[in-house]
Image: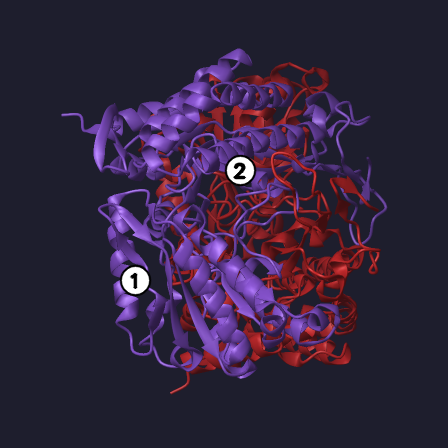
Chain colours: A red, B purple
Amino acid sequence: MATAVWSVDPRTGKQREEVAVEATPAEVDEAVRAAHAVRGSLADRAVRTAFLRTAADLLDEAGDHVVEAADAETALGPGRLTGELARTTYQLRAFADLVDEGSFLGVMIDHADPDLKPVPRPDLRRYKVPLGVVAVYSASNFPLAFSVPGGDTASALAAGCPVVVKAHPDHPATSELCASVLRRAAVQAGLPADVVRLVHGFEAGVELIRHPLVSAAGFTGSVRGGRALFDAAAARPVPIPFHGELGSLNPVVVTEAAAAERAEEIGTGLAGSMTLGTGQFCVKPGLVLAPSGAAGDRLLSALTDAVSRTEAGVLLDTRMRDNFVRGVRERLDLPGVDSPVTPGESGELAVGAGYLTVPAARLAGGDAHELLLEECFGPVTVVVRYENAAEVSAVLERLPGNLTATVHIGEREAAEENGSGARLLAELTPLAGRLLVNGWPTGVAVAPAQHHGGPYPATTSTSTSVGSTAIERWLRPVAYQNTPQALLPPELRDGNPLGLPRRVDGRPEL
Amino acid sequence: MATAVWSVDPRTGKQREEVAVEATPAEVDEAVRAAHAVRGSLADRAVRTAFLRTAADLLDEAGDHVVEAADAETALGPGRLTGELARTTYQLRAFADLVDEGSFLGVMIDHADPDLKPVPRPDLRRYKVPLGVVAVYSASNFPLAFSVPGGDTASALAAGCPVVVKAHPDHPATSELCASVLRRAAVQAGLPADVVRLVHGFEAGVELIRHPLVSAAGFTGSVRGGRALFDAAAARPVPIPFHGELGSLNPVVVTEAAAAERAEEIGTGLAGSMTLGTGQFCVKPGLVLAPSGAAGDRLLSALTDAVSRTEAGVLLDTRMRDNFVRGVRERLDLPGVDSPVTPGESGELAVGAGYLTVPAARLAGGDAHELLLEECFGPVTVVVRYENAAEVSAVLERLPGNLTATVHIGEREAAEENGSGARLLAELTPLAGRLLVNGWPTGVAVAPAQHHGGPYPATTSTSTSVGSTAIERWLRPVAYQNTPQALLPPELRDGNPLGLPRRVDGRPEL
């Protein structure tokens, strides 16, 4: 018997509609084989860019429907979702531009050098080819930008890889809608619709990662779920790359000088960042080191004011709500933990934002407070009050890997080349993939130089899921040795017929 | 009780000298901690390049000793080992040049764009930082170029990572000698000697991959050993990248036209390539598809002549010799397998080269002949006689991933853009990391465009262990957002104070 997949309204907890059925192993197999069968159709870069741009156009056209469907299933609100859709279509077009430009192919040509010592060199020409079918695991908290039409899909298609997306159970209707738009865009661009496939169901996700014709996977989600899939990817007879974004505390360190200069601004800014999207961002600042003393007190006072004024919100699903409520309670039970504003249940389904405090000394030693070093998904942060720089270092040393790390520093610290601000930034760099100064980590710009990844458990690889270099995850290099011109891919021929940026004999050609 | 590590002469099977003892878990821990403690000393690129060049100079100076030690333990012969040493020092200097040039840092700068739609963009600056301590597992068959001073070590040091090398038991004395040269070079370049450490012993290798301060690993060896370490790397609480080169058949396809035009040349060339270094190359052509009929017969006749004339050789150790003899016997026991020149024991410790034949029809279906699709380390190759292109495709479809794949084609096939040669090359590309036309895979040039890697089991990642891009394995990107100039690493500052190649706002700066 097929298991029905229901769209659920998180504002009421009620089932909205039956959207699909969970894919059986045979159906997952059929989806992967169908995607694999059409992989050659993506070989032409011009067709790929047309497809990506058409997909962006059609998603924009269907914008009202998409936002409505996503809001009904996620309660993220039309404002946020309209922004997320704009980000999503911007991203699709940015990857099209990247494919046009061509440097992602990494073309290198070394002409033969018969006189080279110690040995002559043959003619070698290298570029990158797509890996094959990519499995994309959608995120709960970004029904668009990190789901069916999101960054993993966009970068995989840009690389020339068909995708099979595993829908997130929090937004199956949005997933179906977006997949149908992408498949329509494919056909309009002259491609088979099967370059994008969608499957539903937990077991389908497990089948997918094990499928012999799946060549790589992208994942955004929890540490538990991501690690299970990472383990399955590694345990295959033929292991495959698993690019997972799992979890992150996103530590923030506020220096004494910063607190003295901008206590209120920082307290208010923190409240805004940690409650954005009801605290459901992977880059939510979840651990904040603030100084003891008067300036730190002022910061907390501003934080209390702003957080208290924040409206309660509905989390993505009831399981997350239960986890949030339990997670807060468990942390509050630890010795030395206080809650100036207690986060938790607010009405039948909403949760209220809040924050906890703990002295740094509690966190610096022993394992009793280990829990405070784990991400708690939802509108809560932990403020660690420290006495001195040594306590800050002791806490930082215990932190796992993060997507981001932030410092708030004073004016003078920001201007000194080898001062305390610089030292702090250097201390944070090993902990994260993106470092911020006097800002907040929420808001991940889609830009070439972006890096959205970090030491485990932030990501399971050294790659990024946002920005131009996200495409690198789905490619592998191939070198051709002493190959006649007629047999070389055009990307590697003399005269550069495709006008690509290339490194020739060690020097950039364009 | 410490377990002694003996250097053994493979030509006599006798122990030469006691070289070291196997490292205990505590000793592995000490080595990793010592390397980790000095990682900061490698931050300066100029110091790294001086170190790499000094290491090359000192190895050249110690050349006679190094070659003598390596020959005594491996029986590879002074000629081959002198060449391997030259390759090794060339490689160290090539990585120094790469570090000087700086594009491996992948610097990208996106200036803030407050007017960008749909959202303003912050200032983002990205480059790559070293991962930390790298574990290097030496290869049996390259005591220099893929061992202590080899490509993994050179590329890791170039990236700014200290290394802890696990010596191969086939050449512990050479390993000790090379490690002491590298450590001396470090000190001469103003670095702590502990940027390079050496450990011996199987258990030490297992401890090493599990050590929390080891950040990545490079491996060259067997499928069994490499897979066990890959699994251990993936199973860690914090998984790490494992770049392993495990095994490869290196298929060769000879077309009917090639055989008709150059049967003798191809047969003789194949004999030279498959028996080079007594067949102990990871890129040895291990499976050759040759046409049935008269031209193919001439090819085999030339192969028989050349292989028969090849002198018997001594393999690296007795375990390999036993595996080779058993491997050949098991293959010969399969129905339809013949041996025009039977490989196997020759005198007390040497082995003679030979080759097997099998009709393609035997390999194309069923699993009885699966064994022929596994690498057999030593001077043997399997010639598969085919009737038509369909049989070639059927065999290729069954092949696992490879480091290389080669075609020998006729003159006309080499000149036709969409002819049978081009189709064959396209069919082989998914199977390998390096494609060769009318050549032989043995001989892996150290060059920027080289790619020495391929689909599993050739390698466990999409990376290369030879060529410039080998350095990418030991780096991870970091992005700085809205960071004041004084706090930015100099690599990312305005005005490009280090004169690095950078992409600024999407355009190459140098």
Quadrant location, the C terminus of chain B:
top right
The spot of residue B382 in percent (x, y) is 41, 66
Horizontal side, residue B444 vs residue B107: left or right:
left
| Label 2: element kind | helix
Give the percent coordinates (x, y) of residue B298.
51, 72
Q: Mark 2, residues whose alpha carbon is within 10 Å: few (<14), some, or many (≥20)?
A: many
Q: Residue at x 75, y 51 (%)?
A: A103
Is residue B25 shown to the viewer in this render? yes
Type of amino acid at the residue the image marks with label 1 = Val
Going from N to C along the chain, the mark reached first, 1 or 2, is 1
Q: Residue furthest bottom?
A: A1
Real-space CA distance between mark 1 and mark 2, rounded to the nearest whole angstrom: 38 Å
Question: Height in image: B365 above or below B148?
Answer: below
* Camera-nearest residue between B256 and B322: B256
Residue drawn 61% across the image and 16% down it: A420
Q: Check whether the beta carbons of the residues at disc 1 and disc 2 lie within 8 A of each other.
A: no
Q: Is residue B433 left or right of residue B102?
A: left
Q: Which type of secondary structure does the marked residue at label 1 adopt? A: helix
For the residue pair B96 and A344, the one nearer the viewer reads as B96
A103 vs B155, left or right, is right
Residue extending farthest to the left is B1
Residue drawn at point x = 56 percent, y = 20 percent: B57
Residue A449 x/y as whole percent:
71, 43
B378 or B127, which is in the foreground?
B378
Q: Which residue is mark 1?
A: B328
